[in-house]
Amino acid sequence: MAGPWLLQQSLDGMETYFGLAERTGGHTLILNQMEALDAAADTGSRTAVVPRLAIPDVSFRLDLFEDGLTFVSSRLLEAMALPAGCADVGEVDAAACPPEVRGMNYRTLSLTMRVDALDRDESEGSIVEWVDGDGVARSEWMLTAPQPNRPTPRARWRRDLRPPADLFLVAGTSWRAATDALAARVMAIGATGLDFVDPVASAATGDLVSRPR
């Protein structure tokens, strides 16, 4: 069985969202974006403040889009079928959107389950040290970040990896990983605005390798 896959916002989804924001004269379609992001940074919870969407286009149908926060449609959430304790799902105020957009029943999605999923001996990374906001020294193994005009850092999944849920955060990275079972369910509904990317094959080939639709 293939996977895990990285769940990412698709390029066409990104262009759809930010293109619409630009045409409406701004850089975001979240009326209280800074308030929501500041609250998330202060509290550690991305559901602390309810974001207020103002999407004017009645044809807007992305099942996933990101603008500081991750928004998902109710049908995508249903297809994901996430267990309790895997993610925080927050309310969204879509009162400023037309009925067609409100009908998508958007929610915010913030994963809470982090898994030590990479083989550190076979992946390119190092120990990173920093001091947190409370003045406490911290350290963590981190996968090397991609650099322009350089090969994509090598990444390998642990051979004994048994994901505890179908969607999880990968320790040492900013990745969201999904099992092939979840990817299959999501693709079966024709979900838009997202891709499932193979990080191992992408690093090996230098090209973005996605799960076929």
Image (cartoon, grey):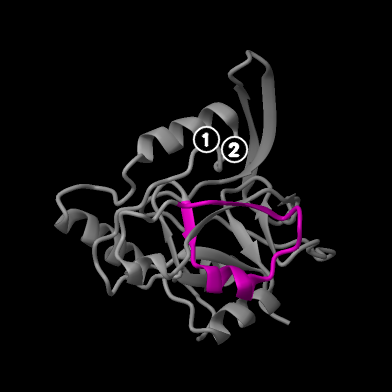
Is residue 40 on the magenta stretch?
no
Mark earlier in primary sequence (2, 1): 1
Q: Is residue 25 left or right of residue 65?
A: left
Amino acid type indicated by mark 1: Ala
- Do the numbered discs 2 and 1 sit on residues whose CB atoms are within 8 Å? yes
Q: Is residue 205 visible?
A: no
Q: Is residue 148 above or below residue 72?
A: above
Q: Is residue 7 left or right of residue 55?
A: right
Is residue 80 on the magenta stretch?
yes
| Residue, disc 1 | 40
User: Residue 77 placed where, x, y %?
Assistant: 59, 68
Q: Give the residue displayed 49% in from the left and 67% down from the top.
A: 73
Q: Give the residue displayed 55% in from the left and 72% down from the top.
A: 76
User: Residue 108 placed where, x, y %?
Assistant: 52, 53
Using the numbered discs, state the Cα–Cα distance from disc 2 to disc 1 in whole angstroms.
Answer: 5 Å
**Image: magenta residue range:** 70-92
Q: Which secondary structure lies at badge 2?
A: loop
| Mark 2: few/some/many CA within 10 Å (<14, 14-19, 20+) | some
Q: Is residue 2 left or right of residue 33?
A: right
Q: Which secondary structure lies at badge 1?
A: helix
Quarter where residue 23 is shown: bottom left
Total marks in image = 2
Q: Give the residue displayed 66% in from the left and 74% down from the top.
A: 182
Q: Which mark is residue 45?
A: 2
Q: Which mark is residue 14?
A: none
